Image (cartoon, grey):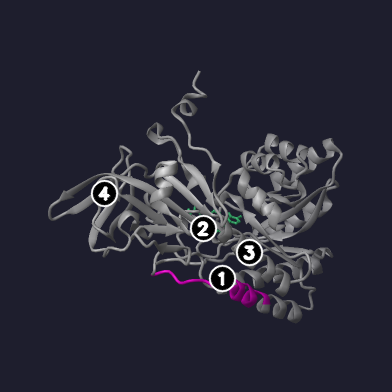
Amino acid sequence: MLSKNITISENGTLEFAGYNTVELAQKYSTPLYLMDEEMIRERIRVYKKALEDFFPSGSVPEYASKAFSCKRIYEIAREEGINVDVVSPGELYTAYKAGFPMEKCFYHGNSKSCQDIEFAIQKGIGCFVVDNVSELSLIDNISKSYGVIQRVILRVTPGIDPHTHKKISTGSVESKFGIPIDNGDAVEATRKALSLKNVSLEGFHCHIGSQIFESEPFVTAAKVMIKFMVKIKNELGFIASTLNLGGGFGVQYTENDPVIDYRAKIEEVAVAVNEICKNENFEVPKILMEPGRSLVADAGMTLYTVNSVKEIKDYRNYVSIDGGMTDNPRYALYESEYTVYNASKASKEADYVATIAGRCCESGDLIQENVMIAKPEENDIIAVATTGAYNYSMASNYNRVARPCVVMLNSEKDYIAVKRETLDDLISLDV
Ligand code: LLP
């Protein structure tokens, strides 16, 4: 089985986080997102402890909530004592309504409107991660009108290519995110930030990409960033106290992906950061990291019911399910690989080549092509593993398909964290 939270029950059905998936499918109906609360907490603790152990005091993970956003996840982040990263008024509002402390909330994004900034300041946002100089001026002006000195960090691009999928690679000079270091723009933006009266610059941020399995790109990024911070100290006399290295550590979607020891990888980054700071005679800054996927992805699983099996001889076998790109657009978008199980027949041999087809009127609506599962029949439950990140958060209502509910599982109970959308929800905004 792909992950330690996936097992097989005595009657041969698939279990997730100790729960029988076929029973959960009956209880809550399908499609159904499951989230293993204990695994989320365990991962958060690994990151938190590693940052505490290997970096200066105040170093802490910041959950990139674009990976999975609902009130419950911000409650968990609050209980675990970490920061969160939000990228929209929607994520911010969800965190706020969940009682997440706003001073621990970082507002990201390359395109913030006046209204977005004003809303965040009204709610008492902790820190803006500023993408560009226009935004910097806007934040300064709006902060002035509210009589606040707003904490900010500047997002800069270190010019690193982490060799991941180009749609999720963000650290290059020409990226739409951040201010390039290479051409001198980042120094000028820093100069500007330091000249403004209503922003208080704390440091710098970079995010190089996602689904990265090695520490090496982070080490390279950290080196570029620290050299940049040294330059800023020498040229502008400003000593940055914070370096945010972004998110991006990968997860295992299939047996072909490595399993990451996150603590060991963070330690490798720390060794390099300490060494370069020592060489440059620069005090080691507080380090923030922004994991999204690696906190929630393998804590998630999606269950579907098989509606039909269609065998096109000499071509392929379509197993059509009751969900698809509306609840998981990642195969359609990135051809992302997943591990698929026939949860109803988990102990049977996976000897049937299946293309798992979604229900949308779109040929590209597939969850996975030519995967091996136990031979399915109508009404079997299909489980797709590692769907905790960028599935619910990227779900849509295409074809007016209602979004599934999210059920959390812990050692005591299973409970609904997000309700299933109803048909009336779907028309609730129609005038
Ligand atoms: N910080 C920033 C500034 C980011 O842009 C991201 C992700 C993260 C942190 C978290 O990265 P993670 O640890 O989750 O890799 N929809 C794509 C992923 C887009 C990632 C966007 N930014 C997918 O489904 O693979």
Residue 313 placed where, x, y %? 12, 53
| Label ID, residue 248 | none
Kind of residue indicated by mark 3: Asp
Q: Earlier in the sequence, mark 1 or mark 2?
A: 1
Q: Residues within 10 Å of mark 3 (few under 14, many from 20)?
A: some
Q: Circle 1 — which element?
A: helix
Q: Nearer the viewer, residue 181 or 145?
A: 145
Looking at the rendering, the stretch of residues picked out in magenta corresponds to: 256-270
Q: CA distance from mark 3 to mark 1?
A: 17 Å
Q: Circle 3 — which element?
A: loop
Q: Earlier in the sequence, mark 1 or mark 4?
A: 1
Report which residue position mark 4 lands on: 319
Kind of residue indicated by mark 4: Val
Kind of residue indicated by mark 2: Ala
Q: Residue 327 sits in which quadrant?
A: top left
Report which residue position mark 2 lands on: 299
Q: CA distance from mark 1 to mark 2?
A: 25 Å
Report which residue position mark 3 lands on: 182
Residue at 51% x, 58% y is 299
Q: Residues within 10 Å of mark 4 (few under 14, many from 20)?
A: many
Q: Nearer the viewer, mark 2 or mark 3?
A: 2
**Residue 328 visible to the viewer:** no
Q: Earlier in the sequence, mark 2 or mark 3?
A: 3
Is 67 placed left or right of 46 in the picture? left
Residue 272 placed where, x, y %? 66, 78
Quadrant in which the N terminus is drawn:
bottom left
